[in-house]
Image: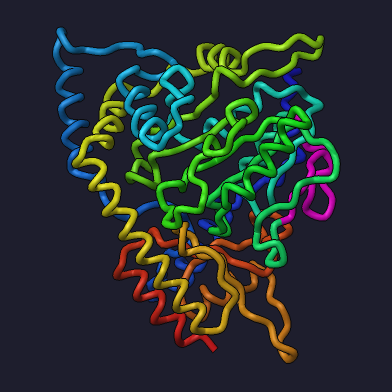
């Protein structure tokens, strides 16, 4: 008899964002006369930049001609795009040690965040900053590294608690871990990290021969020059860190699907038998085996983002979303709520400020109250881990008009 992967049976059945969508649908079905303002998911609302649309059309026409048709492409991604990324995202920022051979084009950050686990041994100790993007935990549970689930936490993980007391920046663990997931600017909290704070993690990883998976999907939203945008801004990171980026939130590629992962050739790892090898070569082997690459048309669209017109469009889009996030932040502060994010991140992490006469609401209770009373959807913070309990995440990715509508409704909340 066929035997399935047992780890699927121990993983909670519902994925956070699927559960949010389910509950919103249930509310909409029972209240068809109510208009819900969606402030929950991280999808974008602005269309693709015109320069991207033109690149898509031109590349599509190329595919219709024998002389310019492209079949299977390189699994690593076309060199024309990898060179543009290396030049614009790294070399122009002084990070000369990252080049095209370190870059692998993907269909988005989520895929590679899940797939990198293919490179880890089954007994690797995983550390995750909490609250955190659910894929960090779920992908490793499916690979058998979770252990037992008790009170919302897996015994096989080290949880790096991010709380108001530490300004949502995790504290270095007092024991050895093997793989560390960090995301800054952070999803969901919107918190950001300085180079000095990141250096502590690089030093720890070097000392403990650990690997850092640095999710920098929101780096383009950084406004403060003291805030880190790339893990490689810290000396030594190229020896211990993989960086993952996406065009989804910077250029509206959520429905197009393209991103990239940086695996420096200077990053080595150790096999169980003790010999060391290149992680870059191992990832290349994995991609060549399990991935056929991103389509030529999509990669030409991504290349257009590095033209002057593309860079201008990205800046305008980010300014638009950051205005929304800033307005949400100001409105919630005006209500006396606890607020994080909205300054170097499109997300606003918030909770009612408690007083002696009030009792804390759970994240799902807060979600329900906003939905019932104001018809505003949110993402419950507890879905990002135990440290998110009592908080919700709101997004700046809706339209400006819908954001103003949500703010007007929030002002009426008792």
Above/below status of 32 relative to 123: below
Residue under the point 65% across and 29% down: 240
Residue 375 percent location from the top left of the image: 46, 74
From the viewer's perspective, tell me whether residue 109 is left or right of residue 398.
Answer: right
Q: How is the image coloured?
A: rainbow
Above/below status of 78 relative to 370: above
User: Which quadrant: the N terminus?
Assistant: top right
User: Which quadrant: the C terminus?
Assistant: bottom right
Residue 169 percent location from the top left of the image: 66, 55
Residue 49 percent location from the top left of the image: 23, 45
Residue under the point 45% across and 53% down: 225
Write the start and end of the magenta stretch as one range: 144-161
Residue under the point 47% across and 37% down: 245
Above/below status of 79 relative to 327: above
Residue 60 percent location from the top left of the image: 19, 25
From the viewer's perspective, tell me whether residue 371 is left or right of residue 315.
Answer: right
**210 drawn magenta:** no
Question: Considering depth in this image, is 234 or 14 the residue closer to the camera?
Answer: 234
From the viewer's perspective, tell me whether residue 396 is left or right of residue 27.
Answer: left
Whether residue 24 is visible here, answered yes or no, is: no
Residue under the point 19% across and 42% down: 309
**159 drawn magenta:** yes
Number of numbered discs on residues = 0
Extreme-bottom residue of the structure:
357
Whether residue 117 is visible here, answered yes or no, is: yes
Question: Considering depth in this image, is 339 or 42 the residue closer to the camera?
Answer: 339
């Amino acid at each position: 008899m066929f035997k399935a992967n047992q780890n699927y049976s121990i993983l909670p059945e519902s994925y956070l964002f699927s559960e949010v969508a389910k509950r919103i649908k249930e509310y909409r079905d029972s209240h068809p006369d109510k208009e819900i303002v969606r402030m929950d998911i991280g999808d974008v609302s602005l269309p693709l930049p015109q320069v991207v649309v033109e690149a898509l059309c031109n590349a599509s026409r190329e595919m219709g001609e024998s002389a310019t048709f492209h079949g299977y492409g390189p699994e690593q991604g076309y060199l024309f795009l990898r060179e543009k990324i290396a030049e614009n995202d790294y070399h122009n920022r002084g990070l000369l040690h990252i080049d095209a051979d370190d870059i692998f084009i993907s269909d988005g950050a989520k895929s590679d965040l899940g797939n990198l686990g293919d490179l880890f041994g089954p007994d690797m100790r995983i550390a995750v900053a909490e609250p955190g993007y659910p894929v960090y935990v779920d992908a490793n549970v499916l690979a058998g590294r979770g252990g037992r689930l008790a009170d919302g936490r897996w015994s096989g993980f080290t949880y790096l608690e991010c709380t108001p007391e530490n300004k949502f920046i995790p504290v270095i663990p007092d024991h050895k871990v093997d793989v560390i997931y960090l995301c800054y600017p952070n999803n969901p909290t919107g918190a950001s990290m300085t180079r000095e704070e990141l250096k502590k993690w690089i030093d720890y990883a070097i000392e403990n021969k650990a690997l850092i998976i640095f999710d920098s999907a929101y780096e383009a939203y950084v406004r403060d020059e003291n805030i880190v945008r790339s893990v490689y801004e810290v000396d030594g990171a190229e020896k211990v860190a993989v960086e993952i980026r996406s065009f989804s939130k910077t250029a509206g590629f959520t429905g197009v699907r393209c991103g990239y992962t940086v695996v420096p050739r200077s990053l080595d790892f150790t096999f169980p038998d003790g010999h060391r090898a290149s992680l870059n070569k191992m990832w290349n082997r994995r991609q060549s085996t399990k991935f056929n690459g991103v389509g030529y048309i999509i990669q030409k669209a991504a290349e257009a983002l590095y033209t002057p017109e593309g860079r201008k469009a990205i800046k305008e889009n980010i300014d638009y979303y950051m205005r929304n996030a800033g307005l949400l932040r100001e409105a919630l502060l005006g209500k006396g709520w606890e607020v994080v994010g909205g300054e170097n991140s499109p997300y606003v992490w918030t909770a009612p400020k408690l007083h002696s006469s009030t009792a804390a609401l759970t994240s799902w209770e807060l979600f329900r109250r906003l939905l019932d009373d104001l018809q505003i959807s949110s993402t419950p913070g507890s879905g990002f881990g135990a440290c998110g309990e009592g908080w919700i995440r709101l997004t700046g990715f809706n339209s400006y008009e819908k954001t103003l509508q949500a703010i007007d409704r929030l002002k009426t909340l008792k």
